[in-house]
Amino acid sequence: MTISAGMVKELRELSGAGMMDCKKALVETEGDIEKAMDYLREKGLGKAAKKSDRLASEGLVSVVVSDDFTKATISEINSETDFVAQNDGFINFTKGTTVHLQTSGVSTEEELTKTQVNGVDFEEYFGTEVSKIGENVVLRRFATISAGENGAINGYGHSNGRVGVVLGAACDSAKTAEGVKELLKNICMHAAAMKPSVLSYTDLDSEFIEKENIAIIADIEKENEELRRLKKPEKRIPQFVSKLQLTEKALVQAKADMEADLKAQGKPEKIWDRIIPGQLERFVADNTQLDQQLALLSQFFVMDDKKTIEQVVAEKAAELGGTIELVDYIKYDLGEGLEKKVDDFAAEVEAQLK
């Protein structure tokens, strides 16, 4: 019997099971919808489908780095409760699924459905595990980064499974790539704590920067009102918030203003070149606050807060006698963007007893 796309669609809507599972069920039952529903329930897939409307916003972020540090995979698999997320069975399931994502080389959900785990179609494998766990479980997102020639990859997943980071670098040689692996791990740990949203300030949208410029200045002005009331030193109010705004013209003007100020103070011109570089450095720091919040390379390294990540990477490259460029950065925060469901436990128990 020919199984039409319409039949598969109907069964999928009734059961909530995956497309491939629905097609297989219809083939096994010769197109009988009711028998196909029974087939899915017997396989545990119907049970999983019944849970599919319950919000899964807990779970784990998992990171797997290949033994040769040329590939890293990050995934977020959600459960309904933190209780399940801390269960050893769920932890092993998320780790095993992430390993499968990496070894199978898939990059989309469509590709994933065509793979098998231990000889079983992925959707069936996943549905069976959901049935064992007893909650709705969702593979929300995943990504894999791979190193190019002379590249290095590393990653970090926090022990509580709530944040994970993977980072990739392009290097000039295999020697440099080998030497930067540990630093990449430390930078991933930094990112997990400081939560930059982009790799470089160049990844920030110009319209977003302009809006944040107004907001940040307003916040500082408001804070200064309180500092004045307390008779404490006020914070400097920046003109800008990102390097994208620091044009050559802006830097030239800043230097001219500094020279004029030094002249007004009566400082000898012969010592200006010893003063102005430090003032320019402070000017750039004051006027790139948004970069420091959101761009990894612009943040001050938690293990050496006198240097930015960009400076630390440059120093490591010089130490190794090569070049290092950070080229890939992915961070997952568990449940980011999901609306958490607040359950009324008493109401749930009452509903179950009716």
Image: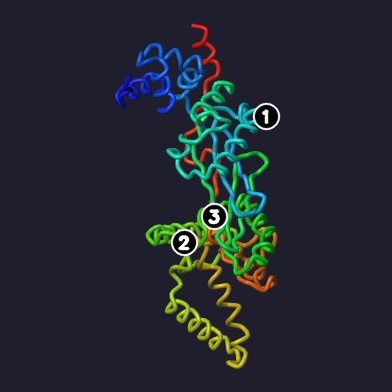
SS of the residue at dot 3? strand
Residue 302: x %, y % from top left: 66, 58
Q: Is residue 199 above or below residue 34?
A: below
Outermost residue, top side: 354
Residue position for label 3:
329
Q: Is residue 197 above or below residue 341?
A: below
* Quadrant in which residue 12 is drawn: top left
Contact flag, marks 2 and 1 (Cβ < 8 Å):
no
Most foreground residue, 120 or 129:
120
Q: Nearer the viewer, mark 3 or mark 2?
A: 3
Residue position for label 1:
88
SS of the residue at dot 2? helix
Q: Nearer the viewer, mark 2 or mark 1?
A: 1
SS of the residue at dot 1? helix
| Mark drawn on residue 69 | none
Residue 314: x %, y % from top left: 62, 70
Residue 90: x %, y % from top left: 62, 30
Most foreground residue, 138 or 159:
138
